[in-house]
Image (spheres, coloured by chain):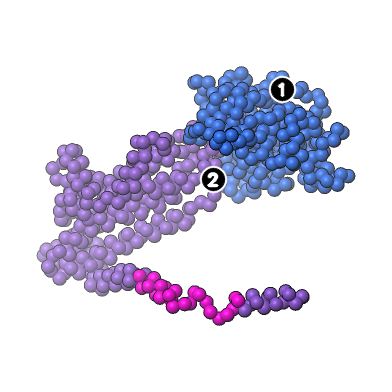
Chain colours: A blue, B purple
Amino acid sequence: MNKTPSTITITPDHDPYTPHGTENSVSQLATPVRDQPGELPLVPPDPVMDARDLNVFYGDFHAVHDVNLKFGRNDITALIGPSGCGKSTVLRCLNRMNDLVTGARVEGAVNYHGQNIYAKGVDPIAVRTHIGMVFQKPNPFPKSIYENIAYGPKVTGMKVDNMDDLVEEALRGAALWDEVKDKLKQSAYGLSGGQQQRLCIARTIATRPDVILMDEPCSALDPIATSRIEDLMLDLKQDYTIIIVTHNMQQAARVSDRTAFFTARPDETTGNRTGLLVEFGLTSTIFSNPRDKRTEDYISGRFG
Amino acid sequence: MSVATRSARETVEIRLSDGRSRERNPASILFLIALWFSLFFGVIVLVSLIVDTAISGAGRFDANLFTNYESKLDKSTTGFRAGILGSIWLMAFTALLAIPLGIAAAIYLEEFADRRSRFNRLVEINLQNLAAVPSIIYGMLAVAVMGLLGYQFKGIVLGGAIALALLILPVIVITTREAIRAVPQEIRQGSLALGATVWQTTWRNTLPSAVPGIATGTILGLSRAIGEAAPLLMLGMAMVRWDPSSIESKVTALPMQIYHLSSMPQEEYQVAASAAIIVLLVMILGMNALAIFIRNKFQKSW
């Protein structure tokens, strides 16, 4: 076994999806059975979403510069990079959550099935019913578990024949049903952090979205809860397209099909750091054979 | 243990326990005494006032105090029925006017208003200032409003309710805003990310979570209003000897009646007024206690 495995070593025959020996057992639990990475095309042929020349400004501050990305159907796409590189900002552009930040301005296009969600006349509320989001910190509503799930379908006016069935289906979908089926009427605040996060995922899939955005969904969770969420993501990708921001490179390597690496470039005059996309490709390529020196430095732990 | 370690420990022990404490030097003690004196001065004045009032009113804590009207013939059984009922009526209509208005204004300012707009900033500054405006000014405002509504005699339930509602409106708006602001942003984002509108998010998530805070602020506002006499004086509220029956009935309030009776020369009226002051104090303390109870019972930890 390799003696220095704290970062992923780049060797030609190294499989980035199998962590080395001294990695904790959790990551091995989460190691999925995968298709051969080589079978995936380099660029998703039929993207569900794509960003074209995406620029984001907060007031005068240029947060993200010229991002071009394509998100393939039933793919898990990981956005990685050091803090302040704009990966969360990009994620929040994908369902117009950035609209809620005062002074935020988005240029360029984000297409969802070919339709620019920033075009005039597009209702951000409708966008968010198709593109759901799971946040960094579990944020269940101060209501019962049942009410948490039923909330989305109620507010979006979804036609539901039997709410009980929908709640069960969503909770099963998020691998939470067996743990909570006897306490659906109890407050969601009584659940553990990992259960709360799976509840938030269940809440999102109850509205039957097409795409699920996840903003560092495991950063507040312990390794066991993290591995359960990772397993869940791999289940969910059968039905959904998932885009995840993560600080954990092992996580990106374990779950994602494609990875986008961002970095921050300081402005020469103001010193403000603008995020930009460095490299986008198959996760296997990014982690084993990155084209860009900055990607290599970052994933091998020499930077960030 | 090496010699070096031992000597270091001894040095520290000597330094830490030399028997002198800077907490106990004369300047500190003097300052502490000054602080205690300030505290006791306030508390003692208040306590002696209450005790003095309670003693002078002690003879009149009987049923007549609550059930009788003011009486010129039998001064020793004079009661505050009109004032107590009047105060209750005024509070009910004040709450009816001020709570919906105040909560709606607070929701607008917190959840919908563009904080950068000049107009909204002006509104915010004015709200802060309005909370400090003397209550008699609100009385004058209510007189003007009643005049516009076409009322000749303004000392009626509606007039009093308008004056008191205007008085506590800024208090309700400010406390409601604080309660709404205390609801974490993550909850709103979670709701919006599911495709809820801002209105649905506010109505179904933010407001229910903020209810304990809003209730507390509202009750504290009302307990301020129930003790007010100045704005009611401006409206020309007179002595009445009947129960209020509609929003247009002439009315008096407990503080008004106390003010009126304590300015009379007769000993019996003075005693009755003292007893009524204690009744008023109990009512206010009861409301404040309810507010504290609600806050402790329902407050959320996020």
**Residue plotted at (72% across, 77% down):** B6
Crowd around label 2: few <14 · some 14–19 · many ≥20 (10 Å): some
Q: Residue furthest bottom?
A: B19
Residue A280 percent across, percent down from the top left: 71, 28
Q: Quadrant of residue A294?
A: top right
A181, above or below B64, in the image: above
Chain of the residue where label 1 is placed in the rendered structure: A
Label 1 environment density (alpha carbons within 10 Å; few <14, some 14–19, many ≥20): some
Q: Earlier in the sequence, mark 1 or mark 2?
A: 1
Q: Is residue B172 visible?
A: yes
Which residue corresponds to the image point at 78% horizontal and 42% vertical from the top-left?
Answer: A7
Q: Main secondary structure of the magenta part?
A: helix
Q: x%, y% of residue A243?
A: 66, 31
In magenta segment, residue B35: yes
Front residue of B112 and A150: B112
Have a look at marks 1 and 2 and say if they share a chain.
yes
Q: Amino acid at mark 2?
A: Pro
Pick the front one: A225 or B185: B185
Residue positioned 39% across, 49% down in the render: B175
Stretch in magenta: B15-38
Magenta stretch encompasses residue A242: no
Residue A142's label in the rendered image is 2
From the viewer's perspective, is B61 left or right of A175? left
Q: Which mark is residue A44?
A: 1
Q: Indicate the position of residue A33 as horizontal and vertical percent values.
A: 81, 34
Q: Does residue B184 appear left or right of residue B138 in this picture?
A: right
